[in-house]
Image (spheres, helix red, strand yellow):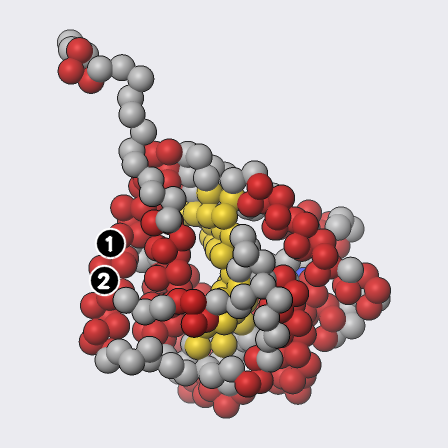
Amino acid sequence: MIDTKDYLVAPGHCVRLHDIATKDNGGLTKKEGMQAIRSLSKRLFELQDLLYAQRAKSLLIVFQAMDAGGKDSTTRRVFTSVNPSMLMVRSFKKPNTEELSHDFLWRVHQHTPPKGVIGVFNRSHYEDIVTVGVNQLQPSKLWQSRFEHINSFEKMLVGEGTMVLKFYLHISKNYQKERLQRRLDRADKHWKFEFADVDAREHWDEYLALYSEAIERCSTATSPWYVVPSERRWYRDLVVLQSIVNTLDALQMDYPEPEFDPNSVKIP
Ligand code: ATP
Ligand code: MG
């Protein structure tokens, strides 16, 4: 079992993504890692069933990363074993006119998971600090007030029964180049290529600095951030899976007791 605390950002801890490794294996071989992933996937399936049976809590997973950082493939691979009818995945793109006419949390709040359900945000309200800040899409005073608003929002979610886990899938600028090149080299990936992703590389350092600040200021004891080394995909999946399973295991869930004696019921 790997120690996911190595990737957890302790509240108040200084974060400098520039200095954090993007590749790791936790001392495991790929074969060992894949074996661990298989057993954690099975456990996640059981835990998801318990979560739904109890309908007392929900779990929100947030993924953020630089372009081509692997948010989609992590979602696909980590949740491959779970029941899709109790999973809600939502990708947040550039806000439309209606979304922009509301406060920045309006569009995300509608998609937080109801009790019993696991929700995945592929990009999230953190875009409203990082992308908005780097590209100066809104006045500084406005987006700078959002660290505090996000902390209050997530605190409210946790207080109301939604657990929150946030994962920054960390890659290097060189690795991103390889992944973007792949979208040019492979005919089945051409549809993914966007010139905007290449343009954003010019602002790499600013993105990393603002992500560092957001992660540092918004990692709390109840709504933590994990910085996941993501250049080995199997290890990235393992860190995310293990963190989710640990969180759900800590609930010590059992199937709810029926309010009747099942032996006394005769089905005609
Ligand atoms: P892929 O990995 O498949 O490219 P993606 O998440 O990058 O998926 P895209 O449609 O390519 O999806 O990009 C979505 C874009 O929307 C990103 O550039 C992201 O920064 C931007 N975006 C998301 N939320 C906001 C927001 N609140 N404000 C401004 N831009 C946003
Ligand atoms: Mg994209």
User: Disc 2 versus disc 1: distance between alpha carbons?
Assistant: 6 Å
Looking at the rendered structure, the kind of residue marked 1 is: Lys
Rendered location of residue 78, percent (x, y): 35, 61
Q: Residues within 10 Å of mark 1 (few under 14, many from 20)?
A: few
Up/down of 15 relative to 59, above or below: below
Residue found at x 72% / y 53%: 149
Residue found at x 35% / y 55%: 245
Looking at the rendered structure, the kind of residue marked 2 is: Arg
From the image, tell me which residue sits under label 1: 42
Q: Quadrant of the N terminus?
A: bottom left
Rendered location of residue 32, percent (x, y): 21, 74
Q: Is label 1's Cβ within 8 Å of ligand 1? A: no
* CB-based contact (under 8 Å), mark 2 and mark 1: yes
As drawn, which residue projects farthest toward the bottom? 174
Left or right of residue 144, residue 108 in this image? left
- Residue 4 is tagged as none
Left or right of residue 218, residue 135 in this image? right
Q: For this rendering, which residue is in front, 52 or 184?
A: 52
Choose top left, top right, bottom left or bottom right for residue 50.
top left
Choose top left, top right, bottom left or bottom right for residue 141.
bottom right
Up/down of 215 relative to 148, above or below: below
Q: Quadrant of the C terminus?
A: top left
In which of the image's four quarters is ligand 1 placed? bottom right
Q: Is residue 29 visible?
A: yes
Q: Is label 2's Cβ within 8 Å of ligand 1? A: no
From the image, tell me which residue sits under label 2: 38
